[in-house]
Image: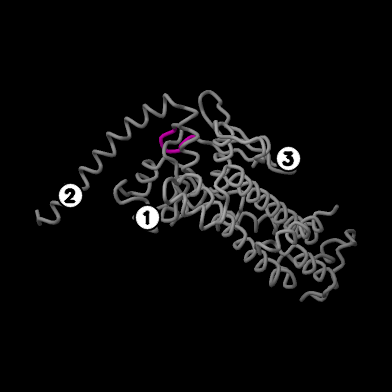
Amino acid sequence: MKFCKKYEEYMQGQGQKKLPGVGFKKLKKILKRCRKQPHSHGVLVDHQNKGNGDSSTCPKQCPVCDGTFFPSLLKEMSAVVGFFNERAQRLLELHLSSGFSKCFIWFKEKLRGNHVALIQEGKDLVTYAIINAIAMRKILKKYDKIHYSKQGQAFKSQAQSMHIEILQSPWLCELMAFHINLRESKVNSRNAPALFEGCSLVLNDGKPSLSCELFDSVKLDIDLTCSICLETLFDPVSLTCGHIFCYMCACKAGSVTIVDGLTAATPNQKCPICRQEGVYEAAVHLEELHILLGQSCPEYWEERRKSEKIERVQQTKEHWESQCRLFMGI
């Protein structure tokens, strides 16, 4: 079965949920129309004939495609990633919540209060993320094939810089950690589906990483070493650019204290790795990953917790002393 048909069947099967998706069929029609319409240079495009050289291909800036193809895909990718992030966040909040708040969320979401329902929701989200990632990958590959260009790959890089590449979502990393945490926990059900196939926490010379095989031989590897302190991540946060750091390391990089938090970072503060600005305000705390690393590296975790506690107390003390001095006008 061709992927286009498979994708359409999947989205139709999710009709009641009204999920945003990639207009795969519509985008293919745009590319098909591009083959038939004459362009501004007066040449009738016929991509089936590859032997005629560059004169038979679309120009690098194709007016037929670029005016509708990329804007449509950009809008659809934004909707898909936004939906995935929102649903994954709610799911993981439910898993990590306790007491009255957990009961309230269960009631609000109308889910059964058991792990099977929770894992099935996660499985559905992972499937949704993967099939849309494949759709985006294939339609961009088709664009490049028709235009004999690398514009599709360039657009993919642009999407990554705009944080709308679904495989770069920090919530996908959180779902991977969630999957491993549930698998390793005593509370497990034989009826519960697996979120990922071949997903594991790998330790190489004491350095951890998340590894997961997704689709079409695409493997997702996430290094869990902080690029600032060069130690295993502790209290990890993901900046909006996708790079992950220890919370205290991120605060230092953003020139803020732990009391003020990352939201206090100014927009001109840059990511230490990619140098992108404005990446601190919407940073995501990776709670599931924090739990996973704490269980996998207990000795290191306890040592790091003690050392960070001392530093946090010191920073908090200095912060309130400075606030008192300001209040008293000293």
Q: In terms of depth relative to the viewer, which is nearer, 288 or 114? A: 114
Residue 263, which numbered label?
1
Q: Residue at x 43, y 45 (%)?
A: 98
Query: Residue 102 vs residue 122: left or right?
Result: left
Residue 217, which numbered label?
3
Instruction: Classify mark 3: residues with Cα within 10 Å, few (<14), some (14-19) or many (20+).
Output: few
Distance from the alpha carbon under mark 1 to that under mark 2: 20 Å
Q: Are marks 3 and 1 in contact (CB under 8 Å)?
A: no
Q: Does the magenta-highlighted stretch encompass residue 229?
A: yes
Residue 269: image location, x then y, percent: 39, 53
Q: Secondary structure at mark 1?
A: helix
Q: In terms of depth relative to the viewer, which is nearer, 22 or 42? A: 22
Q: Is residue 302 above or below residue 120?
A: above
Residue 198: image location, x then y, percent: 67, 34
Q: Which residues are magenta?
A: 225-230
Which residue is the site of mark 2? 322
Q: Which of the two labelled residues, at mark 3 and mark 1, occupies the earlier sequence position? A: 3
Distance from the alpha carbon under mark 3 to that under mark 2: 55 Å
Q: Which of the two labelled residues, at mark 3 and mark 2, occupies the earlier sequence position? A: 3
Q: Which of the two labelled residues, at mark 1 and mark 2, occupies the earlier sequence position? A: 1
Quadrant in the picture for residue 188:
top right
Can residue 161 be seen at all in this image of the molecule? Answer: no
Q: Residue at x 65, y 50 (%)?
A: 124
Query: Residue 286 vs residue 214: left or right?
Result: left
Q: Residue at x 82, y 74 (%)?
A: 37
